[in-house]
Each structure stands twice: as structure tokens, then as C-alpha cells.
Amino acid sequence: MGAMKGVILSINPSVQIVDITHDIPPQDIEAGAFDLLASYKAFPASTIHLAVIDPGVGSNRRPLLIQCAEQFFVGPDNGIFSWIYEREAKFRATQLSNEKFFRHPVSTTFHGRDIFAPVAAALSTGIPIEEFGHEVKDVVRLESLAPKTAGANVVEGRLIHIDRFGNCITNLTRDHLREDPSDSRPKLVVNDREITSFHRYFAEGENDESELFCLFGSAGFLEVAARKSSAARILNARRGQSAVLISGHGD
């Protein structure tokens, strides 16, 4: 990370570098994809997001520059940007093939320093995206964020992220909750555990530390939490597990 910052500042000393996170588990592309999805809209237009979670470094996986949502994204073509593609729908992907923007010699194990950082820095100086390479259409995508409708009142989602507090974040949004939870009795089923409490914020109510509840988090997704405890531990939950929302069955 330090070497990448050094490369960027060597090319554009006036650039402002902001670290989004250093907490991504090694090689965890989905965790990186979620953190990008949760944070990119907080940044101004023309921001350049440099994302390097790259277990395929040195292989034939492609290096990309993405123009999307009035911002830019630089990193490997391994799906890390795919949930942003999905949300925004309109994007342009450029394969980085113009080696004059790379740092030489290019290491086969550190493309973050030798390809992605110098390209991001060059882009920050105003170089047009067309100069970095050619447009591509067949980008790698992670599994879609879209849940499946399983009936009039049933939506089958999944856990897409577990944060460091043990909150279990699903791919369900307010659009999937048919009614206001205060006016009905929705429930979320995870690992055969039914969660029927829906809160507006973490400290609402007088919950026992082992009591699970749902709330909509800052990224807009339905989460399962436990006050001062880990919902993931209580549920023995893992990313990818089913999260079934049943709504509209109040008395």
C-alpha cells in the first residue's frame, strides 16, 4: 500500500489520497466489492477508486479502467466492480493495454504498484481514458445482488457480507419489504432461525445481548444484528447462506 501511494505521488504530487479500508480479508473479492458498493456514492464526481484485491495477479486476468456513475474505478477484472455495474447499469470498461502508463519493469506479483497505481495517477492528471487501452464488453461479474421471488409474500435472499461487528448483511432492501414492519409481522429466516424484531437503529429497545433483530443499515440493505454481540456467531452464519424474507402476514 505504501509503495502504491509513493508511485501515485511521484506522478501527481497534488493528488488527495483517501483510504476507504485496510480491513478486507486476504483475497476476499466479495468483501471488497461490498465495501466499494457501500462507499462510492459518498465521493464526488471524477473520483478515481483504486481497488486492488488481486489473487489472479500475473495471470491472464485483465487490468481494467471503468467509467461509471461519473466516477472512475481502476483494478483487476475479477468482479470487484460488478455490483457497481449492476446498480448503475451504464458503464464503460477499458482494458489497460498501453504500457507507456505502467511502471517498468512490471512485477508479476505487484500490479497494484506497477499497473494500477500509475494508471490511476495518470488519469488524475487529465489523460483521456481512450489513451489507456481499448473498450471491452465481457467483464467478469460476481453473482447478482438480485434476490429471488418465491411467492406473493416470500423473497429468497442471501447473506452478502458479514462485518467486523458480526452484523449479517443481506441483499434485501426496503423494496422487498411489502409493508411497514410496524404495521405487519414480517420475519427473516436465517439458518432455520426466525427473526421477527425489526428496529430503526441498533440501540432501540431493551434487547438481551443474544436477541437478534433486523434493521436497514447505512448501505440500504437489511441486516441481522444483536445488541453488543455478534449476530454471525449466534446464527453460526456465513456469507452466501440463505436469508428468506416473509412479509405481509400480519393479523
Image: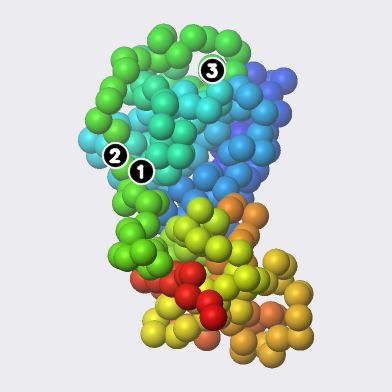
Give the residue number, with chain letter if any, for mark 1. Answer: 79
In this view, the residue in front, 190 or 232, is 190
Residue at image x 55%, y 56%? 174
**Mark 3 is on which residue type?**
Leu
Residue 138 visible in rendering: yes
Mark 3 or mark 2: whose residue is earlier in sequence: 3
Q: Is residue 192 above or below residue 28?
A: below
In this view, the residue in front, 2 or 207, is 207
Q: Nearer the viewer, mark 3 or mark 1?
A: 1
Give the residue number, with chain letter if any, for mark 3. Answer: 123
In this view, the residue in front, 213 or 136, is 213
Mark 3 or mark 1: whose residue is earlier in sequence: 1
| Side of 40 where 133 appears, left or right | left
Task: Please tell me in which quadrant of the rendered image residue 197 appears.
Answer: bottom right
Q: Is residue 11 above or below residue 233?
A: above
In this view, the residue in front, 102 or 39, is 39
Please provide percent x and percent y for residue 119.
48, 22
Q: Is residue 224 above or below residue 235?
A: above
Please provide percent x and percent y for residue 144.
34, 49
The CA span between labels 3 and 2 is 23 Å
* Disc 3, SS: helix
Q: Are the residues at dot 1 and dot 2 in contact (C-beta closer than 8 Å)?
A: yes
**Mark 1 is on which residue type?**
Gly
Q: Quadrant of the N terminus?
A: top right
The CA span between labels 3 and 1 is 22 Å
Near mark 1 (Cα within 10 A), the count class, few <14, some 14-19 or many ≥20, is some
Give the residue number, with chain letter if any, for mark 2. Answer: 140
Residue 58 visible in rendering: no
Q: Nearer the viewer, mark 3 or mark 2?
A: 2
